[in-house]
Image: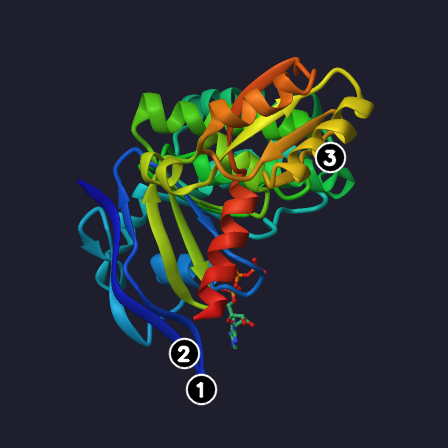
Amino acid sequence: MYSILTHSISKNYKDFKAVSNVDLAVKAGEIYGFIGLNGAGKTTMMRMLLNMVDPSEGNALILGQEVGKAAPLFWNNVGYLIETPHSYPNLTVAENLDLYGKMRLIKRPIREKRINYLMDQLALTSYKNFLVKDLSLGNNQKIGLIKALIHQPKILLLDEPTNGLDPEGLTHVRHLLVHLAKDEGVTILISSHILNEMEKIFTTIGILHQGKLLRQESKVEYLKNAKHQLQITFSSVEEVIEAKDIYKQHKVNWVNSETPYQLRLAEFKDIAAKQRILIDNGITPVEWHEEVESMEEYFLSVLKEADKK
Ligand SMILES: Nc1ncnc2c1ncn2[C@@H]1O[C@H](COP(=O)(O)OP(=O)(O)OP(=O)(O)O)[C@@H](O)[C@H]1O
């Protein structure tokens, strides 16, 4: 049932604990969002899963196989992209990908079909005859993703794969990852600092902080644990100012929303009474909408709580 498991895995660099007793549990076909501040230990975890770094304690299993003891052929099950990918700068995109496919011993017709399909999915086809040295950061990142996927791995480890991608690129990557997990059962462990992207695709979230796994929860658990707020949309900024004033008089706490036309009530209880207050004071908002706090807000509040302890 679990495609990736670690048992009390740790990594020490001299006296520094980069990763500390982490039990990661990633189910088959999941998109597991791995989030944490710079230096939290995400890359170190991924490197241990890929047997690039030896754990100081504990172990890691991929598809039930202990990674430290896996035979070379086992790694055909795994695709990965760890930070900035390397390619040959004086070869074209197509040449680089073809060479990489050959190194993976993929036969020519299958290789061509797969490369064309992935370039098409990531909108890279029009760049196929560009020299890699002339590519933007985002397009280089797409090459890295295609390399990770070229051999149709069952497990995908992606460390900040969306670095440098524009909104269209983000959408293409998102659609491809969701398709792989949902339709092809690929298990994806992905780290990213772009939390509003993560929010759209994750099925389980793992929050790593100072090497420790603070939370590991399914989307359902996350939605239960995250704060629910009432977002109120008004027809004018003046109405917002008036509403803030009225709520202040009634000791109802509010927080500013992303737009000047909106307010949020921090506590999602006694909503009917809180709506009544505005209506009785002659203000009828355009919309009342239940909002779950963003993943960014949730993440920061989990860290704040942990730092208090
Ligand atoms: N080879 C090494 N020697 C010493 N310290 C290291 C080594 N590799 C990583 N570290 C330290 O381990 C900690 C975790 O680093 P890691 O790269 O895993 O974090 P991260 O969560 O991936 O960060 P980012 O989001 O910035 O990529 C950092 O403090 C880093 O400096």
Residue appearing at x 48%, y 22% in the figure: 272
Residue linked to disc 2: 12
Residue 245, x across and y down, in percent: 73, 34
Across and down, in percent, residue 147 comes to 50, 39
- Tell me if 223 is positioned left or right of 139 in this view: left
Q: Could you tell me if residue 78 is visible in this image?
A: yes
Of the residues shown, which amino acid type is indicated by label 3? Asp
Is mark 2 in CB contact (under 8 Å) with mark 3? no
Name the spot of residue 309 as percent of width and height, x first: 43, 71
Q: Residue at x 61, y 30 (%)?
A: 170
Which callout, 3 or 1, points at the residue further toward the start of the chain? 1
Residue labelled with disc 3: 245
In the drawing, does residue 132 fall left or right of residue 21?
right
Q: Relative to 246, is 251 above or below? A: below
Q: Are marks 1 and 2 in contact (CB under 8 Å)?
A: yes
Q: Amino acid at mark 1?
A: Asp
Image quadrant where residue 280 sits: top right
Q: Residue at x 73, y 31 (%)?
A: 130
- Label 3 or label 1, whichever lies nearer to me, is 3
> In the rendered image, is residue 121 in sight?
no
Which is more N-terminal, label 3 or label 2?
2
- Looking at the rendered structure, which numbered label has been put on residue 15? 1
Give whichever of 160, 21 is nearer the camera: 21
Q: Nearer the viewer, residue 150 or 158?
A: 158
Secondary structure category for the residue under label 2 = strand
Marks 3 and 1 sit apart, C-alpha to C-alpha, by 54 Å
